[in-house]
Amino acid sequence: MARYTDAVCRLCRRENQKLFLKGDRCYTDKCALERRAYPPGQHGQGRRKASEYGSQLREKQKAKRYYGVLESQFRSYFEMASKRKGKTGENLLAILETRLDNTVYRLGFAMSRAEARQLVLHGHFRVDGKKVDIPSFLVKPGMTISLKDSSRSLEKFKSNIEANSFRQPPKWLEYDANNMTAKVVAVPVREDIDLPIEEQLIVELYSK
C-alpha cells in the first residue's frame, strides 16, 4: 500500500499552514511551523509570487496532505466527484471526509489521520458489525461505526478520547460516547468541513 514516508512536518512548512499531521505535537511550541515558518529547502526563505497555476497546485497538494491521499487516488476521487450531482469541489471534499480513517479521526479515536489510518489497518473498527480494515472505505448514511469490543479497554483509545474531548464530532455523525459507536446520519456538506481549502481552485486545476 503506497503512502508518504518522509518527515510530515516538511509538508506543513511547504504549505505554510498547520495540517495537523502529528496530532498533539501540532498544538505545542515543538511544531516545526512555529519554529521555522518558511518552506523547507535551500531557497525556502526566498520570496516567490505564486502564479495562477501555482495557487491551484498548492490547494490540491494541501487537500491531499490533510487527508493523507496520494495523487492517483486523489484523482480518482475527483473523477467520482465530477459524476455526482452538485458542485464538484464540494463533492470531492465530501468523499474525502467519508473515508473511514477520517471518520475515525473526526470521532476522536485518533490524534491524527495518520494514526487513524493505522488503527483501521489493525482492525480495531467495525462498520455495521463487520470488520473493515481498509482506511479508504467510504461510509454512507445509515452505516454505524463502532470500536471493537476487545479494543475498548485499551489505554491508547482512552487517552486519545480524553485528549480529544474538546473536539465535537461533525453534524453528519451521531456519536454515542457511552457505547463508543457512531451513526452516519447525512452526507457531509461544505459547512461541516472546517478545513481552509479553496476547492474551486482544485476544480480549475483538473479542468485544464
Image: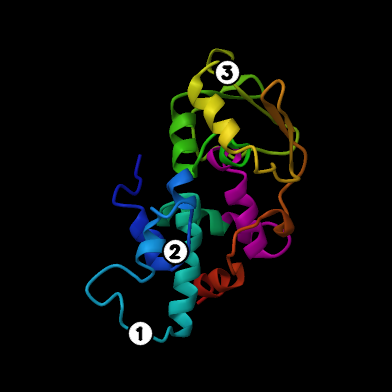
Locate residue 127 relative to residue 56 in the image: left or right.
right
Locate residue 120 relative to residue 98 in the image: left or right.
left
In the rendered view, how is the structure colored? rainbow
> Magenta region: which residues?
80-103
Q: Residue at x 49, y 43 (%)?
A: 112
Q: Which residue is mark 2?
A: 61
Crowd class of label 1 (few under 14; some 14 to 19; many from 20; radius 10 Å)? few
The N terminus, quarter of image: top left
Crowd class of label 2 (few under 14; some 14 to 19; many from 20; radius 10 Å)? some
User: Of circles 2 and 3, which is in front?
Assistant: 3
The Cα–Cα distance between marks 3 and 1, rounded to whole angstroms, is: 50 Å
Q: Earlier in the sequence, mark 1 or mark 2?
A: 1
Q: Which residue is mark 3?
A: 152
Crowd class of label 3 (few under 14; some 14 to 19; many from 20; radius 10 Å)? some
Q: Which residue is mark 1?
A: 47
The Cα–Cα distance between marks 1 and 2, rounded to whole angstroms, is: 20 Å
Q: Is residue 2 above or below residue 122?
A: below
How far across and down, in percent of the image, does residue 141 sit?
74, 38
How far across and down, in percent of the image, does residue 168 sit?
69, 43
